[in-house]
Amino acid sequence: MDIIQLKYFIAVAESGSFSEAAEIMFSAQSTVSKQIAALEKELNIQLFDRSKRRISMTDHGKFFLNHAHIILNSYNDMIRELESMTVQDDNTAIIRATSAMLPYNLISYITHFKETTPDANILVEEFDGEDIMKMLKDSECDLAFFRVGKFDEEHYEKLPVLVEKYIAVLPANHPLAKESIISLSQLSNEKFILCRQNSGLHRNAVAACNKTGFEPDIVATSNHTTNIFEMVSMNMGVSLLLQKGTEHYMNDSFAKAVSLVELKETFTVEVAFARYKKNHHTKAASALWEYIKNITNNSI
C-alpha cells in the first residue's frame, strides 16, 4: 500500500465514481480501477460494491476510509513540516516532468538558471503526465513541466513555453508522402499507430480524427516515438504526432523511411510550466518561476 493508492481510494469514495475520480486525480479511469483493484487485493477485502449502476462503499470500505484520511493527513502534515525545516530545503526546487522533456529545452532552462543562481538545487524527476498535476497539488513537487490538457485556472497557474501542432507521419512510399500539406480526412481509411492508450496524446489524436469526421482504425500503440517510426516505416500504418517532438527523434535512417507531412487542419497542444497557487513556494522554486516567466514573456 502506498500514498498514491490512498489518494485514488479517497477520490473514488468521495466522488462515488471511477470516472469522476479519474478527473480529480488527473488520471485515466483504467488507472483508477487498477489502483483500487491492487489495494483490494493487498488488503484481501472488497472496498466497493460494483454490482449496481453507481458504485457504493462496503462496510470494509467505510472503515478503511476513516483510516485512509488519518494516514493521508498525517503524511501531508509531515511533508509540510519537512518543507519548512531547513534553509537548504528553501534552496531546492523539484520539477516533475513528462518523458518528452528533451525536445522542449527543459534542460537548457535549468542550465541557464543555474548559471545565474548557483546556490539553487534543482531536481528533475520524470513521471507519467497523467499523475503530475495531482502531485503538484499535494506538494510532492514545486513545478510541473508537461503538455497541457484540461487546465484548472482557479487553482493552478502556468507559463506557456510553446504550442505544438500535430502532423502526419507516413511511410516514405505512401501516395501522400511527397505532399507538402494534406487534410487529415485523406487518411480516414488508413490504419493508425498512436501513442499509448489513456495518454493525452492518444486522446488528442483520436479527437482530431473524430473532429475531421472519422474513427481511426488503431492497430498499434507505443510509448516511444522511435518505435512508432519503426512501425510506420514497415507500412503497418500511419501516425499523428507532435511536430517538434517528432522532429527531435528523426535521424538519417528514419528520414529515408518515413515522411512528416503538415496537416491543413490545426490541432495543437500547449507545452507549459505550472504550479499550484496555494502551495508554499520555496525560494529556489520562486526564483526559477520568475526566471522562466521572464524568458517566455520575452519570447512572445
Image (tube, rainbow, N blue to C red):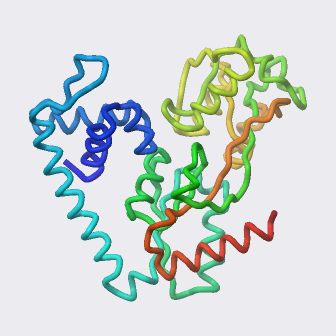
Residue 108 placement (x, y as % from top left):
65, 69
Residue at 84% x, 21% y: name it.
Answer: 176
Write the residue at 83% across / 25% down. Answer: 177
Nearest to the observer: residue 241 or residue 215: 215
Q: Position of residue 229 (x, y in %)?
A: 65, 33
Where is residue 280, by image quadrant?
bottom left
Q: Would residue 42 appear left or right of 296 to someone viewing this image?
A: left
Q: Which is nearer the eye, 206 or 224? A: 206
Compared across the picture, whether 286 is left or right of 259 comes to left
Residue 87 left/right relative to 244: left
Q: What residue is shown at x 59% (from left), y 56% (from top)?
A: 101
| Total residue callouts | 0
Q: Relative to residue 147, is residue 12 depicted above or below?
A: above
Quadrant where the C terminus lies?
A: bottom right
Please report the residue visible at 83 percent of the width from the left and 34 percent of the height from the top: 262
Residue 129 is situated, as x and y percent measured from the top left of the image, at 50, 47
Closest to the observer, 129 or 10: 10
Which residue sits furthest top? 189
Above or below, 244 relative to 206: below
Compared to residue 231, the image places residue 293 above or below, namely below
Q: Can you tell which quarter of the image residue 118 is in?
A: bottom right
Q: Is residue 35 left or right of residue 261?
A: left
Q: Residue 196: percent from the left, percent from the top?
A: 51, 32
